[in-house]
Image (cartoon, coloured by chain):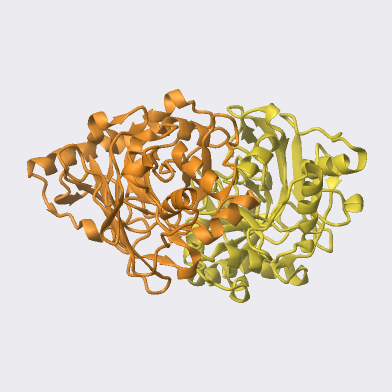
Chain colours: A yellow, B orange
Amino acid sequence: MKLATLRDGSPDGELVVVSRDLERAVRATAIAPNLLSALESWPAVEPSLRALASELERGSAAGAFDFPSADVAAPLPRSWQWLDASAFKSHGELMARAFKQTFSEAKPGAPLMYQGGSDDFVGPWADMPLPSEADGIDFEAELAVVVDRVPMGTPASRALEHVKLVMLANDASLRSFALAEKQSGFGWIHAKPATSFSPVAVTPDELRGAWRDGRLHLPVRIAWNGREFGRPNAGEMSFGFHDLIAHAAYSRNLSAGTIVGSGTISNDDYATVGSACITERRAIEMAERGAAVTGYMRFGDRVRIEVLDSAGQTIFGAIDQRMVAAGSATAR
Amino acid sequence: MKLATLRDGSPDGELVVVSRDLERAVRATAIAPNLLSALESWPAVEPSLRALASELERGSAAGAFDFPSADVAAPLPRSWQWLDASAFKSHGELMARAFKQTFSEAKPGAPLMYQGGSDDFVGPWADMPLPSEADGIDFEAELAVVVDRVPMGTPASRALEHVKLVMLANDASLRSFALAEKQSGFGWIHAKPATSFSPVAVTPDELRGAWRDGRLHLPVRIAWNGREFGRPNAGEMSFGFHDLIAHAAYSRNLSAGTIVGSGTISNDDYATVGSACITERRAIEMAERGAAVTGYMRFGDRVRIEVLDSAGQTIFGAIDQRMVAAGSATAR
């Protein structure tokens, strides 16, 4: 099942069920007004949503319409919590080498994780409003999962049953602040503006065999201004999402709708597959050539993030958005 | 005007207006169902809330009842964002000395700030559920403000007009994780479980002359198991709340209901006024005697946090709560 959110002027938008091929959609507001409320009563609403999805696939859903993939909100326009990890070892190693920084784990064997703003997500094709071109504007292609309520102390072995939806994220970053905020130890405030998500969020069963061990074993394709930038495989996470969720829930309950991110996707074989963010490419350049050559994004630059299945079909739809000056952004 | 939230089984509770002396209350749900929604349309609802508060003070509010100060939820049982600073220089200096750590600012002249969980706040007298007594359980007495929507880029000079409410916080902390999570640079996940807030949130005018320069110039009284632990003055912030809000809003919009915290209150004259958290007292012991003597909290221990006005009347009501094992906590 694939779900999306139409903009309707309300903060949480309008829930729609989307066809597998992302061609058609139908309002699900008779079942739940929005995705956040659906997640809060998932066992009660999931059967009805799945029944509607079946009708849509069969072409018998009343009121179906063409899915406006490039004009939707993020599946969750806002949520109660956004916890983003850094779960790809090769990214941490490249950054540590370039910046002569330790990327130490807080606990041996535990993932790195920060909490980001979750009150103001940006749609997949909406402009990303940012304060200044001078701040080192970057994208980060990521996988993210949405959970229902996870009680404090949930172990990794029970964590995957809480994963209700999977989606793509663009964790936009302002690199000029990243190192200094990291050194402060308090995590990122300036360095992490809003985040955007793919047009649809999908239930794990849509991913079939590519979803295993709490990971999506498929390449994520990143293009910057229409040119391929990377296609690292998201399956190379050092920690699966079950580990990330259990880590997040050690000393807190996670409300239904909490989003957990993988961190920027990165592969050991970066020489072949490229990177999912500019700062990693710059780190590679620093290590290999002694200096970073690639610049950061300029206002007006676009990033596109997408995953295709084995048949070449888009799974989540594409994030495809411009970075722009705050104040000049179109509707999100 | 003083506002509070009754538990009614819903996630956001029921909004009530409370009398200045915290003796009486009246439901305000005809004006706004809960405080979060009131903040989202503050200009429209504030006059009606203030009119109801006047009726309550005059004794003419229909349906008024005794305010159950020890049985309320946090004024915002959940909100979209909780950004907590570390705005007291003396605390940073003491911690830096004890742990031989730099507490470097991310930007020169900028406050330290982390984002904490905001989806699951604990009531002022409710038990604080925690995973283990071995994690170094601590309290942190803080001031916190609640803002309406703050657009990205709002300068400090315009920030105070967004402060709609002021309250006290207990930013419970698990110190065993604090240093390692700080060194990871990603901020705190395990070290910061839920936060609790005072019985009432008050509009700044209730604080009269004690509210100036974006600071509350009054001592905050902290007791641990009934014994005074500290009474540092909250006015000694190195940054006012206007600076904290502007810092928070540099690269993000802040949704209405966002809570901004001062960090643990701390004074240069700690030898006289004591501290607002155990770890600071331990840091002083390490500096002065070579070793920390004071232990952390045990399950069942209570902390009480309160501010009295110049006439000796409680302003926010008291936070007075036990730290308990997760699973054994009473309703929050």
Report the residue at 47% width, 47% height from top. B81
Q: Position of residue A330 (x, y in %)?
A: 61, 33
Q: Position of residue B133 (x, y in %)?
A: 45, 69
Q: Position of residue A275 (x, y in %)?
A: 82, 48
Could you tell me how many numbered marks the image carries? 0
Which quarter of the rendered picture does the C terminus of chain A lie within?
A: top right
* Viewer-proximal residue among A18 and A177: A177
Residue A85 appearing in the image: yes
| Extreme-top residue of the structure | B157
* Viewer-proximal residue among A275 and B134: B134
| Extreme-left residue of the structure | B59
* Viewer-proximal residue among A313 and B19: B19
Q: Is residue A14 above or below residue A149?
A: above
Report the residue at 57% width, 54% height from top. B179
Residue B131 appearing in the image: no
Q: Quadrant of residue A243?
A: bottom right
* Residue A172 left/right relative to A43: right
Q: Position of residue B111 (x, y in %)?
A: 51, 35
Report the residue at 71% width, 29% height from top. A299
| Extreme-bottom residue of the structure | A157
Q: Is residue A29 above or below residue A141?
A: below
* Residue B39 left/right relative to A246: left
| Extreme-front residue of the structure | B289
Q: Is residue A112 above or below residue A99?
A: below
Which quarter of the rendered picture does the N terminus of chain A lie within?
A: bottom right
* Viewer-proximal residue among A135 and A1: A135
